[in-house]
Image (spheres, coloured by chain):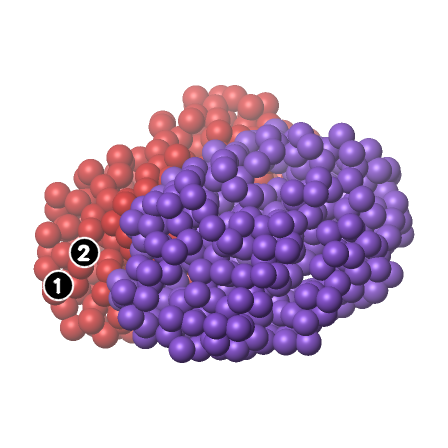
Chain colours: A red, B purple
Amino acid sequence: METLRVELGSRSYPILIGQGLLRERSLFEQHLRARDLLVVSNTVVAPLYLDVLEASLQPRRVVAAILPDGESHKTLATVGRVLDVLVANRFGRDCAVVALGGGVVGDMAGFAAATFQRGVAFAQVPTTLLAQVDSSVGGKTGVNHPGGKNLIGAFHQPVVVVADTRTLATLPPRELRAGLAEVIKYGLICDADFFAWLEARMDALLAADPAALAHVIRRSCEIKAEIVGRDEREHGDRALLNLGHTFGHAVESATGYTEWLHGEAIGAGLVMAACMSRESGYLTSEELERVTRLVARAGLPTHVSNVKPDIALQHMRIDKKVQAGKIRLVLPRGIGSAFVTADYAEPALSRTLEAHLG
Amino acid sequence: METLRVELGSRSYPILIGQGLLRERSLFEQHLRARDLLVVSNTVVAPLYLDVLEASLQPRRVVAAILPDGESHKTLATVGRVLDVLVANRFGRDCAVVALGGGVVGDMAGFAAATFQRGVAFAQVPTTLLAQVDSSVGGKTGVNHPGGKNLIGAFHQPVVVVADTRTLATLPPRELRAGLAEVIKYGLICDADFFAWLEARMDALLAADPAALAHVIRRSCEIKAEIVGRDEREHGDRALLNLGHTFGHAVESATGYTEWLHGEAIGAGLVMAACMSRESGYLTSEELERVTRLVARAGLPTHVSNVKPDIALQHMRIDKKVQAGKIRLVLPRGIGSAFVTADYAEPALSRTLEAHLG
């Protein structure tokens, strides 16, 4: 088992990464003190891992809330159902909520924990690559609004993240590929060596090679923990983690969260961000080509045909990073560096959207 | 104008108290920087003060969300409507939400501000005595759940509280009396002199004497600001501010939030807490009599006939202060002091409920 740490003063917490951690009762005893636990999962993950997790949480009182699967259910109404379960079981302020699943489950369980009794303890047990490398770390919780992705939410840090890499063995290939989008993002924003490593080892990752996946999870969590520790509330560098997300969220919103997985939309979003950088002189054509090729090799879309450019632009205008009406974009500057800017030519944005959408 | 301060490090903020502050544009310019503002109010307060406030917020972009009046509307669904307005108007992370009204409006506007885009700026413009002496200060926001009062919410501090005491001139007498319940609470938990002052000046307060009200608002805010500054998240002394609230919330929940104003329920709750203290030896019969008499003189109920004791007990069991299944109570110890305890005799609780309910 490897242990990383997110350093946030009194809210610091460990990220535990290893094979078979779901079965290690002592870990949960050590890191999760509450006697009343609500496990939030979904209809796909619960049949696979809920029994195992519940056994590791015994002899405490464990109640489960099983949600429908998919980003289209990540709504205030679904979180309301989780809160109903907490109230119906008379859980107190000293309970804890445990998220067992991917990013959607983690976001909603975390938001329920953030708002139940104005905040109760929360643990992340991510079972997808995307959740293990990204969404389970950093305390962003929330739900979508019909008007835009993640527009409603809270910062609420977990007390522990338990990433059992063995759960990736049951992950559908499409979900594995979706997780690789966030991994490529980390290389692109701050680690050129890691980006090159991904180029060299993409075949092993697609074959779900355990050693390759373990390396990817560790390095991704290291990068994320370091950035979150520096800038928890996204006043500065944390915004770099949104590379590709303004584009990607627009793709998700415009298709009602039903057509594309989050990671797939982010794959296309990375390519669009790189295209904007090339248009603006921050990437060479060769670097753009490396980004596009790596996204394509990960089995992710580099072009999204079912979203019209003007519709995407409308959705981009309600992104959380809009300031004074101007869409701010995270753009790569070379491979391994990125920055936030609102200083770009509108025609470049139009060309980028038209080249990759519709 | 008087200025108090809630000291919370980088989240410190001023409480401005005075006659006619709603009209002072310079105050809002100084303390509220956002260019896009959502004013949340209700159908009773908006016709009286929305125009005045909007004029003071010009020339910025001001949108209003007018909610139905009353605690029974303090739900997740109503907050969802406020969030819809924010999204529909494409407000960004740099907007601010302004609560214009009483405690219900403030709680919901604050919760919307806490969760929109994971937190935007928030200002309180309280127009009731209860909101000016209590709910607008301290950052507790949230909504009720059918299973219990304020079970869903967040801590989200305002950037400024603007208490225009002139708004109390239009306050219905019933609302004025409800506010006095929280005022009596402050005297009872930590200021015997203030309690005695209230005994001496109750007639002036009921006649809405401006000088008497100004004193009450200032002293109440001083006490609350001091306690919140010491214990923002209610790990310790802040719980004392809940004196009477475990009983009072049960009365409100049991009657569907439609029969009693919050302050009326708290009035009865103060008497029940004092009764428990007398039963447990923490108050003399004379002190209990002083509490009961002051609550009655404020025109507040000391007995609630439309709630059955066993139903109230069920509601008390889902209070936020329950720990390990035991209801913790805030009890006065003499006049001017209080403490939190789960160490009391169950029959004393039953006798207290039976004496004051049903």
Residue B291 visible somewhere in the drawing: yes
Question: Residue B6's spot in the image, x, y percent?
Answer: 68, 68
User: In which image quadrant can residue A316 be found?
Assistant: top right
List the residue tagged with mark 1. A58
Name the quarter where the C terminus of chain B is drawn.
top left
Q: How many marks?
A: 2
Question: Along the horizontal axis of the image, is A104 left or right of A210?
Answer: right
Q: Amino acid at mark 1?
A: Gln
Image coords of residue B324 (percent x, y): 27, 66
Secondary structure of the residue carrying numbered label 2: strand
Mark 2, residue position: A62
Q: Are marks 1 and 2 on the same chain?
A: yes
As shown in the figure, which amino acid type bears the numbered disc 2?
A: Val
Camera-nearest residue between A46 and B194: B194
Depth check, front residue: A64 or B179 = B179
User: For the point 80% across and 44% down, which residue is it?
Assistant: B169
Q: Position of residue A174 (x, y in %)?
A: 26, 38
Residue found at x 64% / y 54% = B298
